[in-house]
Image (spheres, helix red, strand yellow):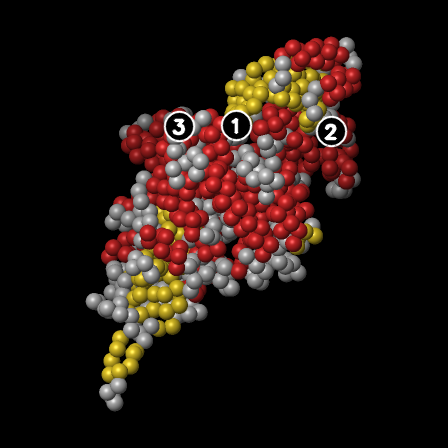
């Protein structure tokens, strides 16, 4: 009988964008990266697009796209982020699906995923439908085909969810073995589930053909048919639990050969059906959770493709779609409703203190989960009522319109939003009515995003994932306040008071501390622009996150490092089409910023105040000019605190640049004034005093950073800086230096793309890598290796032919190319 192997990766991160801004803000815990999406992309998503095959000496011999040979799904919100921030990775993922269709008889390996990772059994029917519709439309937009399968978040399932999948054309999904309840063999032309027969005494009885497979006893090596109450059907695959667990938690990825052996060991010669040995884990296992796990996966796939294993018949790689085409299910299955792969209590992990947690804080509880879920359920139901009542005034079918709103998430320009409104409006709407419709849609979007599963998965209500979910709830309620007198915040906060935090006492404090500071309206967005405008020059029209800002007037005065500016701006929300004109004054002092912002009134009044403020400033009466600004202009005053997080850091660095320069100068003065003394200590092999040691390390590190920050690297300066570090044999924190080195090496390698025949450039890059390596600086060579590999594939053969005929230029190129390969650990 035929034997197959299929490896599935569930690649997912929760949406991390600030809900009001539409972009991910700085996350300190992801250091040295900007945020967790960026970090996990560097560690997992990107490496799997170009994974390495190594020889016995650890040198790279081939680079392959893992996604093209496995089964995979990516969260739609993660793909959206990748499309904006790492288009190279995004395009490689989409291309992998096309390659897999060629490999697997027209069946693409990509699966869809319920849109924002909502736990489906805990959702109402309307939300389940929208999650599936949005997932399918997002998938079609990205992969240009209808998905065959759909990944259920946390594999959480109930019959209603399967009915919705089947009703929307989804052929299969993947579940954990413990989610299967009973199986029976499919009898052709069977009319009823039970088989009636006569006993020896002639009485009639019923033989129940169902076999109990609870507690993970189901045979995972085949596909099952699930008959649904509606008469529809869906195919179910139950992955191999023990092997999947070993990959995720027991170090199986330490060896590609062991990986293969474990999969081969799951083949049972006594089975009388074609076997598919398949596993499913978080995709982040391959590179993020297990460093270089993607390379173990690559080697495993290579061995299967080449048939390089012992004592077994040929085993083919496949994906689920191809296997279903080749082999019909022999067994029918019943599932356990409200079950999942990551909670042994069903779906308790996302609604109560069930005992499931990360295991990192054994003394903590998760009693906060229940009131958080209850509070969000109330918000959802209240919003649903107002959405339908208000939406029915403007839309033909509000719920159908919500399903179609995914097209606006895929293309959120003004034209797409306008087309959406025109298609679904009862009549031609006024601009104000259009704005109300968009707010209703954004309200619904955020009401679904707040149920993203990660909000309950971890241990503490103040964790970044739960704060993210509460932020979505806050924005949904912010929109709802335009339609509901008194809003919904009070009831939600009361529920958070019942949510016991392990750190802050009650969930309401986590909400106050971490959610409310994120909240943005047109006024705060305007203040952000006003404050940041005094630190960087903006064009007349500029996009600031989810807002378009038009500068109608701007004037400023300077006195040394002090500045004061006045302006008029028009700000437009891309999500809701709301817009407003503001006038502002902003003052930059030595160590801070003051801003006053007001609704536009009249140019005459603004001009009068501006004249008085500027006159006072130019006469050196700085405190008086600031006082006029606050007393005579507006009732909204802002400071650095009101800047969005990323801009806060940039502005603070600029404000403190003089202080940083003084500190740098002080350390350098200590170093230069005491270099003879330090050399004396070194000659006598006596450790430096701590004060001198700190200054020495600081200066040596700054010298290295300065060299690596330069776009056109000075090789002699680099050698000098490296020589000093080696001479003093000091420990330097290399994490930041590694990043600088990575950027510089990538810049040099990018130059090779257009100057591939410039032999001296290969020599220069090799010299840089050799110098850095000598002091333990390890740039991430992933991108550089990819570039090197591509250049070799495109030009190596022709250069070898030229060299064979005595072409000295070709010989030099080949020599330098090969030498650079040594430093990049690549052999072609």
Q: Earlier in the sequence, mark 2 or mark 3?
A: 3
Indicate whether 568 appears above or below 794.
above
Where disc 2 sits, the SS reads: helix
Question: Which residue is located at x 66 percent, y 14 percent?
Answer: 606
Quarter of the N terminus within the rendering: bottom left
Q: How far across and how far down the image is residue 712, in percent?
A: 53, 24
Q: How far across and how far down the image is residue 716, in percent?
A: 57, 26
Is residue 788 visible in this depiction of the protein? no
Q: Around disc 1, counting alpha carbons within 10 Å, would you say few (fewer than 14), some (14 to 19), or many (20 or more)?
A: some
Q: Around disc 2, counting alpha carbons within 10 Å, would you say few (fewer than 14), some (14 to 19), or many (20 or more)?
A: few
Question: Which residue is located at x 37 percent, y 69 percent?
Answer: 182
Is residue 730 visible in this depiction of the protein? yes
Q: Which residue is labeled 1 in the image?
A: 578
Mark 3–mark 1 CB contact (< 8 Å)? no
Answer left or right for 806 relative to 436.
Answer: left
Which one is nearer the viewer's eye here, 477 or 563? Answer: 477
Of the residues tagged 2 and 1, which is closer to the observer? 1
Where disc 1 sits, the SS reads: loop
Question: Which residue is located at x 59 percent, y 33 percent?
Answer: 520
Of the residues tagged 3 and 1, which is closer to the observer? 3
Where disc 3 sits, the SS reads: loop
Q: Residue furthest toward the left?
A: 189
Q: Which residue is labeled 3 in the image?
A: 428
Residue at mark 3 to residue at mark 1: CA–CA distance: 19 Å
Q: Which residue is labeled 2 in the image?
A: 663
Q: How far across and how far down the image is residue 92, in percent?
A: 38, 39
């Amino acid at each position: 009988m035929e034997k197959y192997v299929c490896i599935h990766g569930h690649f997912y991160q929760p949406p991390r964008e600030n809900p009001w801004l539409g972009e991910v803000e700085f996350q300190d815990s992801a250091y040295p990266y900007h945020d967790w999406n960026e970090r996990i992309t560097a560690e997992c998503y990107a490496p799997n697009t170009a994974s390495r095959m190594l020889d016995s000496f650890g040198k790279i011999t081939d680079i392959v796209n893992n996604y093209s040979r496995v089964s995979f799904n990516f969260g739609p919100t993660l793909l959206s982020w990748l499309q904006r921030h790492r288009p190279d990775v995004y395009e490689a993922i989409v291309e992998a699906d096309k390659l897999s269709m060629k490999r697997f008889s027209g069946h693409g390996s990509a699966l869809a995923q319920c849109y924002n990772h909502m736990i489906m059994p805990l959702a109402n029917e309307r939300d389940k439908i929208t999650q599936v519709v949005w997932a399918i439309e997002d998938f079609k937009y990205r992969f240009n085909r209808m998905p065959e399968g759909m990944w259920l978040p946390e594999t959480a399932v109930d019959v209603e969810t399967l009915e919705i999948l089947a009703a929307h054309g989804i052929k299969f999904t993947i579940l954990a073995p413990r989610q299967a309840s009973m199986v029976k063999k499919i009898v052709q032309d069977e009319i009823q589930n039970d088989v009636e027969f006569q006993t020896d005494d002639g009485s009639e009885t019923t033989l129940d053909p169902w076999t109990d497979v609870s507690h993970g006893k189901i045979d995972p090596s085949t596909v099952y048919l699930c008959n649904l109450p509606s008469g529809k059907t869906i195919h179910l695959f139950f992955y191999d639990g023990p092997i999947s667990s070993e990959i995720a938690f027991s170090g199986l990825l330490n060896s590609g050969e062991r990986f293969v052996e474990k999969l081969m060991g799951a083949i049972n010669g006594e089975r009388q059906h074609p076997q598919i040995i398949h596993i499913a884990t978080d995709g982040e296992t391959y590179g993020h959770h297990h460093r270089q796990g993607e390379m173990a996966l690559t080697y495993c796939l290579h061995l299967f493709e080449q048939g390089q294993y012992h004592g077994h018949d040929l085993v083919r790689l496949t994906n689920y779609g191809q296997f279903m085409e080749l082999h019909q299910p022999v067994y029918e299955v019943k599932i356990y409703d409200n079950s999942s792969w990551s909670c042994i209590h069903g779906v308790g992990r996302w609604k109560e203190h069930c005992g499931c947690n990360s295991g990192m804080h054994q003394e903590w509880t998760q009693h906060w989960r229940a009131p958080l879920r209850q509070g969000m359920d109330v918000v959802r139901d209240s919003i649903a009522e107002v959405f339908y009542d208000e939406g029915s005034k403007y839309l033909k079918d509000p719920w159908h319109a919500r399903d179609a709103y995914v097209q606006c998430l895929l293309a959120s320009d003004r034209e797409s939003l306008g087309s959406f409104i025109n298609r679904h409006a009862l009549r031609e709407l006024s601009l104000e009515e259009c704005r109300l419709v968009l707010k209703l849609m954004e309200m619904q979007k955020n009401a679904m995003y707040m149920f993203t599963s990660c909000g309950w998965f971890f241990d503490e209500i103040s964790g970044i994932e739960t704060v993210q979910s509460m932020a979505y709830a806050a924005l949904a309620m912010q929109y709802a306040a335009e339609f509901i007198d008194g809003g919904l915040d009070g009831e939600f906060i009361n529920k958070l008071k019942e949510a016991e935090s392990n750190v802050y006492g009650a969930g309401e404090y986590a909400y106050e501390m971490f959610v409310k500071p994120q909240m943005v309206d047109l006024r705060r967005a305007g203040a952000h622009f006003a404050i940041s405008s005094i630190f960087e020059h903006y064009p007349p029209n500029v996009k600031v996150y989810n807002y378009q800002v038009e500068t109608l007037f701007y004037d400023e005065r300077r006195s040394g490092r002090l500045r004061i500016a006045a302006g008029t701006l028009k700000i437009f929300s891309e999500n809701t089409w709301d817009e407003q004109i503001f006038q502002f004054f902003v003052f930059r002092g030595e160590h801070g910023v003051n801003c006053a912002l007001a609704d536009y009134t009249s140019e005459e009044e603004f001009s009068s105040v501006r004249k008085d403020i500027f006159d006072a400033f130019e006469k050196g009466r700085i405190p008086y000019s600031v006082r006029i600004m606050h007393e005579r202009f507006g009732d909204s005053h802002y400071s650095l605190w009101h800047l969005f997080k990323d801009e806060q850091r940039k502005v603070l660095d600029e404000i403190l640049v003089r202080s940083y320069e003084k500190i740098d100068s002080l350390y350098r003065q200590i170093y230069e004034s005491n270099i003879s003394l330090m050399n004396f200590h070194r000659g006598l092999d006596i450790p430096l005093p701590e004060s001198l040691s700190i200054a020495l390390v600081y200066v040596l590190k700054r010298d290295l950073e300065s060299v690596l920050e330069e776009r056109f690297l000075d090789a002699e300066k680099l050698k000098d800086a490296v020589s000093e570090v080696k001479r003093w044999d000091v420990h330097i924190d290399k994490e930041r230096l590694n990043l600088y080195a990575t950027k510089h090496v990538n810049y040099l390698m990018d130059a090779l793309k257009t100057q591939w025949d410039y032999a001296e450039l290969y020599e220069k890059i090799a010299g840089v890598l050799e110098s850095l390596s000598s002091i333990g600086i390890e740039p991430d060579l992933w991108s550089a290796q990819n570039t090197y590999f591509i250049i070799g594939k495109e030009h190596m053969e022709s250069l070898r032919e030229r060299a064979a005929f005595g072409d000295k230029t070709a010989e030099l190129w080949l020599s330098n190319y090969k030498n650079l390969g040594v430093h990049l650990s690549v052999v072609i």
